[in-house]
Image: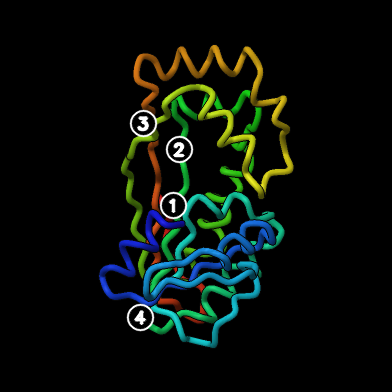
């Protein structure tokens, strides 16, 4: 996710982006990235880095795309690659008027809830410190056509079709929720876990 990758690189960090989608991974390989930013095709449960070699691991709007059955492997892999003072940062979307539009063709409420439960039950006990942040940004579109093209053109999507997006019901909801400037608030919940441990802890998410 370039939202975090580019600012981190500009601040001096060496950033490795991991994407399991072969189409997106090929686009990544063929793109010229700024210094200190690179991408590899790999999955979250098999990260292409050594033990205790990373300062941090970030999941930006991506944890809920991973099958919940893989969460034990994923979080164990994160703990494997993090240094003793490392951190795990997971940001997930919250419900919003924009989400009400998306739900008309792609309802993620269930998998988002599974992601939050996985964090609380599996990831939090692996770390010494937990912090929960809430913030919001904005998503802006020029038109419904631009929105529909972006949604329908995602290479990693196999859960809905272009026809699902280009429906009158979706257009009407987009116009109603986004009028007059098609600018939507995008609230988020970020969980920051610091200092991985080898035994279960007693931290709790609130």
Kindly give the residue lying farthest to the left in the view shown: 11
> What's the CA distance linking mark 1 and mark 3?
15 Å
Q: Are marks 4 and 2 in contact (CB under 8 Å)?
A: no
Task: Please give the residue where the numbered disc 1 appears in the rendered image.
Answer: 91
> What's the CA distance linking mark 4 and mark 2?
29 Å
Give percent across and percent down for residue 53: 46, 85
Residue 156 lies, with reference to residue 45, above or below; the image says above
Occupied quadrant, residue 113: top right
Task: Please give the residue where the numbered disc 4 appears in the rendered image.
Answer: 85
Task: Please give the residue where the numbered disc 3 appears in the rendered image.
Answer: 185
First in sequence: mark 3 vs mark 4:
4
> What's the CA distance linking mark 4 and mark 1?
20 Å
Residue nearest the observer in this picture, 47 or 3? 3
Give percent across and percent down for residue 72: 64, 67
First in sequence: mark 4 vs mark 2:
4
Q: Which of marks 4 and 1 is in front?
A: 1
């Amino acid at each position: 996710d370039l939202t975090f990758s580019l600012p981190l690189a500009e601040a001096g960090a060496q950033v490795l982006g991991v994407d399991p989608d072969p189409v997106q991974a090929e686009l990544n390989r063929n793109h010229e990235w700024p210094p200190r930013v690179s991408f590899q095709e790999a999955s979250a449960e098999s990260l292409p880095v050594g033990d205790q070699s990373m300062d941090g691991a970030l999941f930006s709007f991506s944890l809920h795309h991973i099958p919940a059955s893989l969460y034990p492997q994923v979080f164990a892999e994160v703990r494997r690659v993090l240094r003793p003072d490392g951190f795990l940062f997971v940001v997930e979307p919250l419900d919003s008027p924009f989400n009400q539009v998306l739900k008309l063709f792609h309802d993620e409420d269930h998998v988002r809830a599974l992601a939050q439960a996985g964090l609380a039950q599996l990831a939090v006990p692996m770390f010494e410190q937990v912090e929960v942040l809430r913030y919001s940004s904005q998503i802006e579109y020029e038109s419904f056509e631009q929105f529909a093209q972006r949604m329908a053109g995602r290479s990693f999507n196999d859960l809905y079709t272009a026809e699902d997006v280009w429906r009158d019901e979706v257009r009407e909801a987009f116009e109603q929720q986004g009028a007059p400037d098609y600018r939507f608030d995008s609230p988020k919940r970020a969980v920051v876990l610091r200092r991985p441990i080898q035994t279960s802890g007693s931290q709790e998410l609130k």
